[in-house]
Amino acid sequence: MPLVDMKNMLGHAYYHGYAVGAFGVAGWEILEGVVAAAEGMRTPIILSVSNTYPGTDSIESLARGIIEMAQRATIPIAFQIEVEDSYEAAAVAIKMGCNGIVFNASSHDLPDNVKLTQKVVELAAASGVLVVGQVGQIESGDTIEGLESVDNSSTTPAEAKYYVERTGVGCLAIAVKRFTTGANKYDFTRLSKINQAVGIPLGIHGSAGFTDDQLKRMISFGAAKINYSSVLLDVAAQRIRENTMAGVEGYSAIMEGVRDAVRLEVERCIKVWGCGGRAAEVLLQCQSQERDHALLQGDNRQSVRLA
């Protein structure tokens, strides 16, 4: 089936309190493993590519493979490309056929971040592509839960609201940070406040290192998309190391089991994030939204003729 509208997919997850995995694809074995897990557990997924993934300096062939895989799949699949803060890269990504762009200009000050993101959102809107934006980080130093951080690099709910209202992004990426270096206590209160302020799906980037319970808590505070790439690369690399240490030779033998190792890890994530068995619901919502949009367009055309 064609790629499913990413805005509708994330909207369903946000409303129903679960998260969709945006799984990083850095090779065919990973791509096949992710899709096999999603098909088996009847879950919506987002496939993600980036030039920053190891061995993926050119992502054009992966993009074509992902679109072809989505057309053969029986589950809803969306496709995002991470472009950092490059308008030109965003334009190229749209031409590749993605329906989601991860645009991160958070290294710029807030006014420039807003201006850069606005331009990409306007560009993407013409093709029905959702933009995931980012403003600052949820971060604090020696604070206690429930109090605002004094760290100027931290995202405040007011900044997040300002950014979302002026850019029109469909999802806000959040980096949840520790209270103190080396501690295992995170600023979930700030995450909750930002969720209340912006009212759109939140995305968790840099999810490696969080416990399952921590990710579940983030989901309860509005995290509807979880980027997951480095762990899949580690899983694949570990399987390759095991094959090599076993003394096997040849590409096929060395890559044996990589797909299944990735599949098992993705299945584990699906269980934790609550998205298993949601494929039919998401497809139904997306089809309903498409019908409503078509009817609205028809009404608008009729109004123009009558005028």
Image: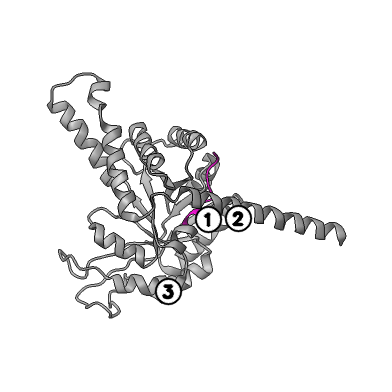
Disc 2 + disc 1, Cβ < 8 Å: yes
**Residue for badge 1:** 8
Q: Any mark on residue 289, and which?
A: 2
Q: Is residue 6 magenta?
A: yes
Residue pictured at 25% horizontal, 53% vertical: 208
What span is in magenta?
Answer: 1-10
- Tell me which label, 3 or 2, sits earlier in the chain: 3
**Which residue is located at x 32 percent, y 51 percent?**
271
Amino acid residing under circle 3: Gln
Q: Could you tell me the amino acid type at mark 1?
A: Asn
Rendered position, 212 above or below 144: above
- Quadrant for the N terminus, please: top right
Q: Nearer the viewer, mark 3 or mark 2?
A: 2
Alpha carbons under labels 1 and 3: distance apart = 20 Å
Label 3 packing within 10 angstroms: few (<14), some (14-19), many (20+): some
Q: Secondary structure at mark 1?
A: helix
Q: Quadrant of residue 59?
A: top left
Mark 3 = which residue?
196
* Residue 255, horizontal then vertical, whole percent: 26, 27
Residue 63 at what x, y percent from top left? 46, 37
Q: Quadrant of residue 141?
A: bottom left
Disc nearer the start of the sequence (1/3): 1
